[in-house]
Image (cartoon, grey):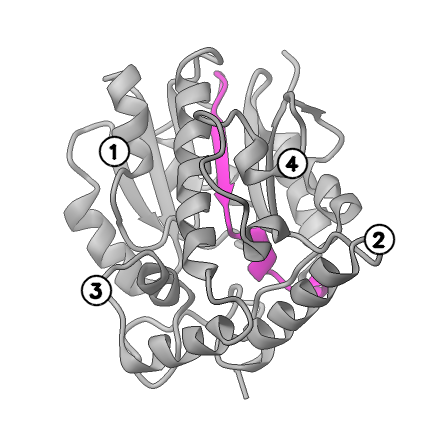
Amino acid sequence: MAEPVSRTGIRKPVGVDTTRASIARVYDYSLGGKDNYDVDRAAYEQILEVAPRQGDVSIMNRRWLHRVIRYLAGPAEIDQFLDVGAGLPTVANTHEIAQQQRPDARVVYVDNDPVCNAHGRVLLEQNENTHFIPADLLDEGTLLGQADITRHLDMKRPIGLILCGLLHHIDDELDPVGLMREYVELLPPGSYLAISHFHDPGPAHPELHTLAKELERRFTEKGLGSGWYRTTEQILEYFGGLELVAPGLVQLEDWWPAGPALRERYPEEWVMVGGIAYKPG
């Protein structure tokens, strides 16, 4: 049985413990990475039993993140980013995408896992405008009030707050809606909030609803301890009433797609959504 959720974070960070599956390492494995262990692969195999193309969901999530960063650094003219729950470094990270368009863009990565922090500092801090900070989304007072983070950002100017595949690992008992309300309140005017999240389309789509609930059971009971599939209405609450950027909260491949679909969407890909919201100036 997975370890229960802890107030110190989504779960107590696994770090170098190779007897427990790590969210960051499982995600790394799903992307084809090498920074994972047998326990991580065993936990992921539980997911693949019912969602054999879950690896495509992870890749889809990264593509969505890349499009989001290009939009924010491009048309939205954002030049400073806070990427929370950054995880293990992989191909084409946030600062690489942002600094392709804005070489002076500032990017602060945050994660609560010691291993992610060690890897991140070595591989991601490639210039004076990129930093990796050990911290937790659930820290009291929010990350937007922490001097270690805000000293790298100008909090009088807009930022892009990125929560890519993070909030679905936070239990309802930790009040993610209330938590995000605090973050939205502290965001400087003109900022953007980007969220991707596991999605339960509900009884109106019985097959996908069944898939979402079974995936949720396997994430929460079969090794990782977290991974909740929430409804559109629940996910919208995380934006705190901010104005959603078109096309709104949609399946990831429907958010500013890079081109026409080249194949039919896998069932697993239908149960994840994302969107961006804007805080008026």
The answer for how far apart the CA atoms under marks 3 and 4 are is 31 Å
- Is residue 5 visible in this depiction of the protein? no
- Is residue 226 visible in this depiction of the protein? yes
Give the amino acid type for the residue marked by disc 3 in the picture: Lys
Q: Which mark is drawn over residue 232?
A: none
Residue at horizontal 23 percent and vertical 17 percent from the top = 103
Query: According to the image, label 2 marks what residue?
Result: 204
Sequence order check, earlier mark of 4 and 1 = 1
Which residue extends farthest right?
Answer: 204
Sequence order check, earlier mark of 2 and 4 = 2
Sequence order check, earlier mark of 3 and 4 = 3
**Residue 255 magenta:** no
Q: Secondary structure at mark 2?
A: loop
Give the amino acid type for the residue marked by disc 1 in the picture: Thr
Q: Secondary structure at mark 3?
A: loop
The answer for how far apart the CA atoms under marks 2 and 4 are is 16 Å
Q: Secondary structure at mark 4?
A: strand
The answer for how far apart the CA atoms under marks 4 and 1 are is 30 Å
Q: Residues within 10 Å of mark 4 (few under 14, many from 20)?
A: some
Give the amino acid type for the residue marked by disc 4 in the picture: Val
Q: Residues within 10 Å of mark 3 (few under 14, many from 20)?
A: few
